[in-house]
Amino acid sequence: IFTPRGKVLGGSSSINGLVYTRGQPEDFDDWETPGWSFGELLPYFKRSEDQAGQGLRGDALHGKGGPLAVSDQQEPHELCDAFIEAAVQAGHPRNPDFNGARQEGAGYQQLTARNGRRCSTATGYLKPVLHRENLTVLTDALVLKVLFEGKKANGIECETEQKRITVKANREVILCGGAINTPQILQLSGVGPAALLGAHGIPVVLDQPHVGEHLQDHFQARIALKCTRAITVNDDMQSWWRMARMGLRYALLRKGPLAVSAGYAGGFWRTRPELKRPDVQTHFLTFSLDRMGEKLHPFSGFTASICQLQPTSRGSVHIRSADPRTPPAIRYNYLDTEHDRRTMVDGMRLLRRNLEQPAIRPYIAAEYLPGAEVQSDDEWLA
């Protein structure tokens, strides 16, 4: 499974799909941890944002003047309009702002960009303070491990192309390597399950069996469709003059396919009416391909996906070597629980029903993946 990560300033915010959506308020409230309710976090969300959408929003739910640029899509697309209208025809509300008063419904995504240009965390937070004398940014450096004095972290060891470097901390070490690299670095540093560390000859600083466990990811499944009209990114990429036009539109106007997020439109839906909040999310893409990271299909195509919002399956990240260059074993353990299997099958059925609505039917020549022959629960799960 394609698992890209950003080995670049800004981390994965420099390579992601640009979609800006906060977690559901209920997700934070369910933690029941003081200081982490949605109401308590909202001021920090607002403080981080520089909203440029829908009248330059700066209200009770949106922020202005923060470091992270947040904007609406620059222009609509007729496929997205058809998809949103089809969702409304299927009984879902129209939603112009997934970060507004409610999340449920169908609409256009917001993106972390300003004037068509990506605003990564490096752009928003790092570049404005690079001039500070108390900041040193070291690039092309691989962290080998965190250094400890007893059980107190007091520095790191890293390696550049030229040499190995030890950096000592006067106050603290902050480890923020993401969901994959954070447990990997901890395990390489001697913090993790003692049996795993011992198997790779790493001295144990702290036997902590939870490090690398409980990996959660939002499983996605896609329906790819052949389009009746040559209006998709697939078509743009099949033509030299359309690619040139696409490049010119971006260079001159900061518009077109090069200025949109990976999820152009989308929605948050409930697979069962008795649920109190959406349990699946859809991303609508104006292109199609067999697998993310591979080539686009040679025909006119678009994609709609279902993503589970509260998965109960749990996986792990375990080092496979004491060498930091060796990628860890990433086991997502998708669809391990009946809850997740039921949610995904119901979500895909819901998505297909939306794609059968009058507003979008004229654009669909055929369902390419998984194909109309897939009908039963077992066929969907396969």
Image (cartoon, grey):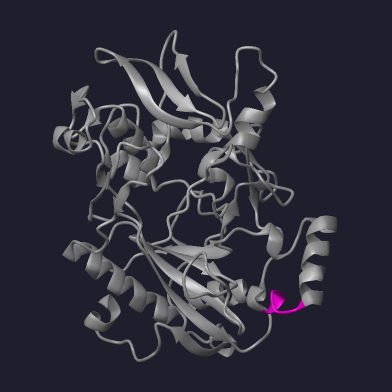
Front in this rendered view, residue 178 or 49:
178
Residue pushed farthest top? 170
Front in this rendered view, residue 187 or 358:
187
Task: Return the x and y of residue 272 as percentages of the image width and height.
Answer: 28, 68
Task: Return the x and y of residue 97 as percentages of the image width and height.
Answer: 55, 54
At a point 54% along the width and 30% down the height, the residue shown is 160
Q: Magenta part mainly helix, strand or loop?
A: loop
Q: Is residue 349 above or below residue 260?
A: below
Placement of the C terminus among the 4 image quadrants = bottom left
Placement of the N terminus among the 4 image quadrants = bottom left
Position of 222 with respect to 340 (left or right) is: right
Task: Return the x and y of residue 48 as percentages of the image width and height.
Answer: 56, 33
At a point 66% along the width and 16% down the height, the residue shown is 132
Q: Quadrant of residue 298?
A: bottom right
At a point 25% along the width and 27% down the height, the residue shown is 190
Q: Is residue 209 above or below residue 70?
A: above
Q: Is residue 291 above or below residue 108?
A: below
Q: Please report the bounds of the magenta region as a residue range.
A: 235-239
